[in-house]
Amino acid sequence: MQRRQFLQSSLAASAGAVLSTAAPAESGARQYYELRRYHLNSGPQQKLMSAYLENALVPGLNRLGMNPIGVFDLYLGPETPTIYVLIPANSAEALATSEARLSKDEEYLRAGEVFLRAPAKEPAFERFESSLLVAFEGYPKLTLPPVSANHGKRVFQLRTYESPSVHDHQVKVEMFNSGEYGVFERAGFWSVFYGDTLIGSRLPNLTYMLSFPDLSEMDAMWKKFGADPEWKKLTASAKFNYESIVTNISNLVLQPASFSQI
């Protein structure tokens, strides 16, 4: 067996093993997400990466049955330029084997040739990181903002909550499933996805994405969120406030690429 095939099959097997213990039997309806972070240098890399994503990766993943694909530029946060790519799938195996399947897609290889064969002296990107997430039981599938289909004005907030222990992490996930989604909805946010990180850095943690028309709307919505009676009830509950179950929050603001499907 070739090394690439071995790595792909090993990743699929390990992801399957994690999910068999992390997700209940009825979790077949829950989606899985790969969240990529491409770190770039300012200049030619940005143009090359954008062309690759628009003309090769996004349509290639669509042909594999993965859609919609989100592509976002980091607007507020550290280490710019950084591009985030959100890939939803119906199984962890589909994500683990996507690279191998794309390597057999002639249209993908042709459209992405300049990027894929960039010389070592002029690399197409610096590094990329990848996390594997499973959708929360209470929010099993990605939801598009209502303006995405027409590429309407929208910005996104990507938030990651780290917890001090696996138990506290599970309690925080339960807090979302106990009514927090409704608080976001009443405040006017467009929820995109809520995911439990299975493979990635700084575990245990969860990541979710919200959307809204612009930054001023975001600030107004968070004020409504904090004043919501259901949110006050949740935060006052001894079940959820017995200690600091979230110890660190990463908060990023993203702008969608012109060709982003989310």
Image: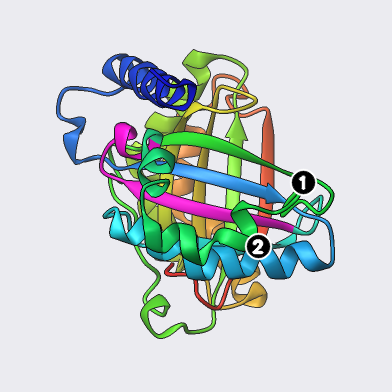
Tag 2: amino acid: Met
Residue at the image position 41 percent from the left and 76 percent from the top:
148
User: Mark number for residue 156?
Assistant: none
Label 2 secondary element: helix
Figure quadrant of residue 261: bottom left
> Residue 176 versus residue 225: which sits nearer the camera?
176
Provide residue 5's location: percent of width, then percent of height: 40, 25
Callout 1 crowding tier (Cα within 10 Å): few <14, some 14–19, many ≥20: few
Residue 239 at least partly seen: no
Q: Which residue is mark 2?
A: 49
Quadrant of the frame with the N terminus = top left
Q: Which residues are magenta?
A: 82-95
Residue 231: image location, x then y, percent:
47, 47
Q: Measuring from the top left, give residue 244's x and y in whole percent.
A: 63, 24
Q: Which residue is mark 1?
A: 126
Q: Residue at x 48, y 84 (%)?
A: 152
Q: Are marks 2 and 1 in contact (CB under 8 Å)?
A: no
Q: Position of residue 69 (x, y in %)?
A: 42, 60
Whether residue 74 appears in magenta in the rendering, the answer is no
Query: As rendered, which of 145 and 240 lies closer to the eye?
Result: 145
